[in-house]
Amino acid sequence: MVGTLPVGMFINTDNSVYVADQANGRIQVWLNGSTILTGNYSGGLSVPYSVFVTDNSDVYVDNGRTNYRVDKWGWNSTSSVPAMYTCGQCYSLFVDINNMLYCLMGAYHQVVSIKETMPNIKIDKIERIQNVRLWNHYAIRRRELKKELRAMPNLQIELELFHGTRITPPSEVYNGDYGFDMTFTSSGLWGIGIYFAKNASYSCGSYAYTLPNGKKQVFLAQVLTGDVHDCKSDTSLRRSPKKNDKISNLRCNSVSGDTEGSKVYIVYKNRVVYPTYLITFIP
């Protein structure tokens, strides 16, 4: 008996079967092709959706719907550890030969992957930001951008990226008129813009905001990157470069580059970012 709401299933090379029993918050296991239930993984799980098992029997389970993470059980372990922090449910999980963990987040139409970029911190809480005014401005701009870039239907125009506010209280972002406001920006490697990172480790360092109790905070934001111009550092930038000087005055929507082990993205306008989640952690 699997349960009232079985969803994800995984079968490994020795014919062991792992099934996500969502209704009962557990992963049920039938080892080595057995028809008799062998055991289950359940500690701390809430409505799990997907499961993946590696060749060395590490078990990765979606725990993102309410706990915003993927949990990992090592071989013969009775307890789990967080393997990835997410913004929601993972509809599919995969671990490649380099131990890169992938989470398919259907609600955001993208795949999020983090290769242990936050290994030494403890997540205290994850808060979803709800600001109707900011969201409406962002949604309007997203619709406009889709129309502007309709000639590139396969282009991913929106990414989820990390941002640390340093000395600026995060409340000034999620309660402000513009959210991430160009007024508070300073010059960086790609000029004066608002900087976001693909890797959490980049934002969780010196860019994280420090609370009086020593805990730190960073945002996970939805960013309209649109048509991205990837380039080396250029401190003279004040807006995105033109797409092609000889054809038109149209400009790219954002700039990207590589620094400190992470891909970074820079936008130069207000209202093209929404502060989706505020993550509080203990370094």
Image (cartoon, rainbow, N blue to C red):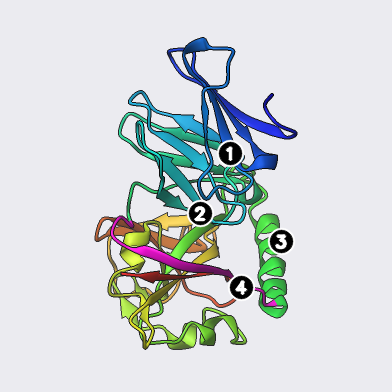
- The amino acid sitting under disc 1 is Arg
The tag on residue 26 is 1
- The amino acid sitting under disc 4 is Ile
Mark 1 and mark 4 in contact (Cβ < 8 Å)?
Answer: no
Q: Compute the Cα span from label 2 to label 4.
A: 15 Å
Between label 1 and label 3, give the one nearer the viewer.
1
Q: Which callout, 1 or 3, points at the residue further toward the start of the chain?
A: 1
Magenta segment: 118-131
Give the position of the N terminus as an image quadrant. Answer: top right
Q: Residue at x 65, y 49 (%)?
A: 107
Q: Compute the Cα span from label 1 to label 3.
A: 39 Å
Q: Is residue 124 magenta?
A: yes
In-front residue for pair 157/73: 73
The tag on residue 129 is 4
Asked whether, in this view, residue 18 is left or right of residue 151, the answer is left
Mark 3 and mark 1 in contact (Cβ < 8 Å)?
Answer: no
Kindly identify which residue carries mark 3: 143
Q: Is residue 128 magenta?
A: yes
The tag on residue 86 is 2
Asked if 211 appears above or below 202 in the picture, the reply is below
